[in-house]
Image (cartoon, helix red, strand yellow):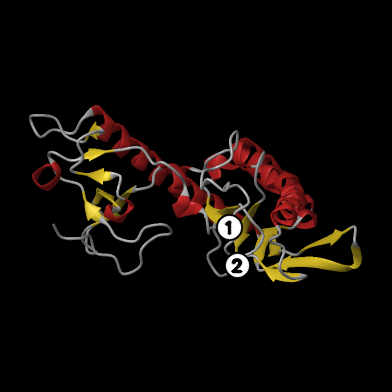
């Protein structure tokens, strides 16, 4: 079984294999017992489709660089995830980004000269294999089961959401309303030593308000304005995440970079 081409694997994925009935006709998928693969991750990619749901739990910011992408912050420092418990499971009643929910599956290009994408999986996670128990991936006729069809549909919809996210980010770039982000948080016991977090991008509210009325109307009609507001509202949760880190004893320095 040959691995898919992987010049640079996405976040979480340590290897990729294309799923096929020839090699995996008798394979089954079990249940992910925990979210250990997420435990050291402080920022997870997010699609614009998810902004309204995600902004209830996480600050939504954008990566620095020439091609920023949206991320949900699970922590403010590298390697700190404040939503993973000691049992390595996600805390209850928290939104789980689609990027996390699709793991260990993913749509990937098997050939760099083709746009065709195939359903692949990370074999290192251990939940997919020749198990005695679990959900079958293929039926007796070597056809994908309803479960596999559902996984493929979810991954396809995730890719489509990714295209909408790219269009959203392209529009933000054209509007030129982004700025380098900086958040200063002060602890009550050390008011003269604020913790300053940088290294991310955010929408500049003053630039947003200064847009011509026709631009704002267009953003309202195409649904982008509510996404921008969800992003801005979510920034109020920076302090919540900071307090979660304080409770975990994982506030490490008064000046940090979110990346």
Q: Quadrant of residue 50?
A: top right
Residue placed under numbered mark 2 in the picture: 64
Tell me whether the residue at label 1 lies in contact with that at label 2, contact meaning CB atoms closer than 8 angstroms: no
Residue in the picture at 18% in, 34% down: 144
In the picture, measured across the screen, residue 24 lies left or right of residue 255, that is left
Cα distance, mark 1 to mark 2?
15 Å
Q: Position of residue 142 (x, y in %)?
A: 10, 34
Q: Position of residue 138 (x, y in %)?
A: 16, 34
When the figure is inspected, residue 53 is found, relative to residue 48, above or below; the finding is above
When the figure is inspected, residue 57 is found, relative to residue 250, above or below; the finding is above
In the picture, measured across the screen, residue 83 lies left or right of residue 192, that is left
Residue in the picture at 22% in, 60% down: 4
Residue in the picture at 86% in, 59% down: 187
When the figure is inspected, residue 65 is found, relative to residue 121, above or below; the finding is below
Q: Position of residue 112 (x, y in %)?
A: 24, 64
User: Element under label 2?
Assistant: loop
Residue in the picture at 90% in, 57% down: 188
Q: Quadrant of residue 71?
A: bottom right
User: Nearest the camera: 46 or 25?
Assistant: 25
User: Element under label 1?
Assistant: loop
10 Å crowding of disc 2: few (<14), some (14-19), many (20+): some
In the picture, measured across the screen, residue 26 lies left or right of residue 174, that is left
When the figure is inspected, residue 126 is found, relative to residue 249, above or below; the finding is above
Instruction: Name the mark on residue 42.
Output: 1
Q: Earlier in the sequence, mark 1 or mark 2?
A: 1
């Amino acid at each position: 079984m040959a691995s898919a081409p992987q010049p640079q694997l996405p976040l979480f994925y340590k290897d990729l294999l294309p799923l096929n009935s020839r090699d995996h006709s008798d394979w089954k998928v079990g249940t992910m017992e925990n979210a250990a693969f997420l435990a050291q991750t402080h920022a997870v990619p997010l699609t614009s489709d998810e902004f309204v749901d995600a902004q209830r739990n996480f600050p939504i910011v954008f990566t620095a660089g020439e091609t920023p992408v949206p991320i949900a912050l699970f922590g403010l420092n590298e390697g700190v995830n404040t939503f993973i418990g000691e049992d390595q499971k996600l805390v209850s009643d928290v939104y789980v980004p689609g990027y996390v929910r699709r793991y260990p599956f993913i749509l990937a290009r098997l050939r760099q000269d083709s746009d065709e994408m195939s359903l692949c999986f990370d074999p290192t996670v251990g939940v997919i294999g020749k198990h005695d128990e679990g959900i079958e991936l293929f039926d007796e006729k070597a056809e994908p089961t309803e479960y596999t069809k559902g996984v493929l549909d979810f991954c396809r919809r995730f890719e489509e959401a990714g295209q909408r996210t790219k269009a959203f980010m392209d529009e933000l770039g054209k509007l030129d309303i982004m700025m380098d982000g900086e958040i200063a948080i002060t602890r009550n016991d050390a008011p003269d030593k604020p913790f300053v977090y940088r290294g991310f991008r955010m929408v500049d509210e003053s630039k947003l308000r200064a847009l011509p009325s026709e631009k704002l109307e267009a953003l309202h009609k195409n649904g982008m304005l509510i996404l921008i507001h969800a992003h801005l509202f979510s920034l109020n949760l920076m302090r919540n995440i900071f307090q979660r880190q304080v409770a975990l004893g994982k506030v490490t320095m008064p000046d940090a970079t979110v990346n």
